[in-house]
Amino acid sequence: MFQGMHYVYEVYREMSFSKAARNLFISQPSLSAAVKKAEAQIGFPVFDRSTNPIRLTELGEEYIRSVENIMDVEKRFCHYVDDIQGLKSGTIAIGGTNLFASYVLPPLLSRFTEQYPLIHVNLVEATTSELEERLFGGFLDLLIDNQSMDASIYEKTFFCEEHLLLVVPSRFSCNENLKCHALTLSDIKAGRHLDQSVPPVPLEAFREEAFLLLKSGNDTRDRAEKLCRDSGRFAPRIKLEPEQQITAYNLARYGMGISFNGDILIRHMPDDHSLTYYKLEEPHALRNVNFYYKRNRYMTKVVNEFLKLV
């Protein structure tokens, strides 16, 4: 009854016979025939073809749930075999946003692949919401992120703390009265912003300036607005809303406005005197970076070894 289930599942994933056929490297007529054969074995249609796009029938929904259970069993067995082979084969899929894929994961993956050269590593770079969807669906083993995720669904392994800093173009006149709070890039790289003797900057001093805040829904954006509201008693005047921290940082370098950036990113930036940095008040400026993985999912030896390295 489940012969040809992989053909049916690919059509379900794409909700399109043509897209599924391309993914499977077969012709659309061949795929349609395979799906019809599977439906004949079941005795009922899996897809309602009268809609555009197609959708699952009521029985089709139950069929897909059963297929996912079967696929999970297959995957667990494959992982078990990989474990027995003593990490001489196997895979690990790790997801991260541009920030983590560019600056955090490379040294970790380099060390891991040096120790286990036969393990295939799949690095996926996307937005947090896209990555969480893939983690939930089983397409990722691990996700590294600085946002909090539902503890009822995901477990986590702590990696490090991240501290948000205010990044201000040095040519802005507001810097003149804040020299006692100002930090340089060298200060950040040396960790001086972590010293308790360094006071946070009074954010109200920047209420008239233009800000570069990430798009709504991003944790950095949420924290930036809370800092302005709670510490500065104002709503920031937003000039641009970039997608990534690195974009906001580079826009600030060219004097476009003030950005909020984590010290993870800033520590990787080349020396530049065009920016001035300021410490911000906790707790909004402090967040944890964690590796997340789905609860109750079989944890392969490969994933365990990577988390040990972390």
Image (spheres, grey):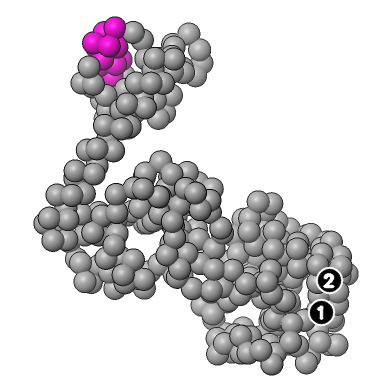
Question: Whole-percent x and y of residue 161?
Answer: 53, 74
SS at badge 1: loop
Disc 1 marks which amino acid?
Pro
Q: Looking at the rendering, in which quadrant would you find the C terminus?
A: bottom left
Disc 2 marks which amino acid?
Gly
Residue 201 falls in which quadrant of the image?
A: bottom right
Q: Which labelled disc corresponds to residue 232?
A: 2
* Viewer-proximal residue among 192 and 266: 192
- Kindly identify the residue that appears in the image at 25 percent across and 59 percent down: 302
The residue at which mark 1 appears reads as 202
Q: Can residue 36 be seen in this view?
A: no
- Kindly identify the residue that appears in the image at 65 percent across and 51 percent down: 217
Q: Is residue 48 visible?
A: yes
Neighbour tally class for label 2: few under 14, some 14-19, many 20 plus, Cα within 10 Å: some
* Viewer-proximal residue among 10 and 146: 146
Q: Is residue 41 magenta?
A: yes
Image height check: is 95 above or below 256?
above
Q: Is the magenta stretch mostly helix, strand or loop?
A: helix
Q: Are marks 1 and 2 in contact (CB under 8 Å)?
A: yes
SS at badge 2: loop
Question: Whole-percent x and y of residue 41?
Answer: 23, 10
- Kindly identify the residue that appears in the image at 70 percent across and 81 percent down: 279
Question: Whole-percent x and y of residue 196?
Answer: 66, 89
- Residue 86 as seen in the image, left or right of residue 30: left
Question: Whole-percent x and y of residue 182?
Answer: 73, 87
Q: What stretch is highlighted in magenta?
A: 30-43
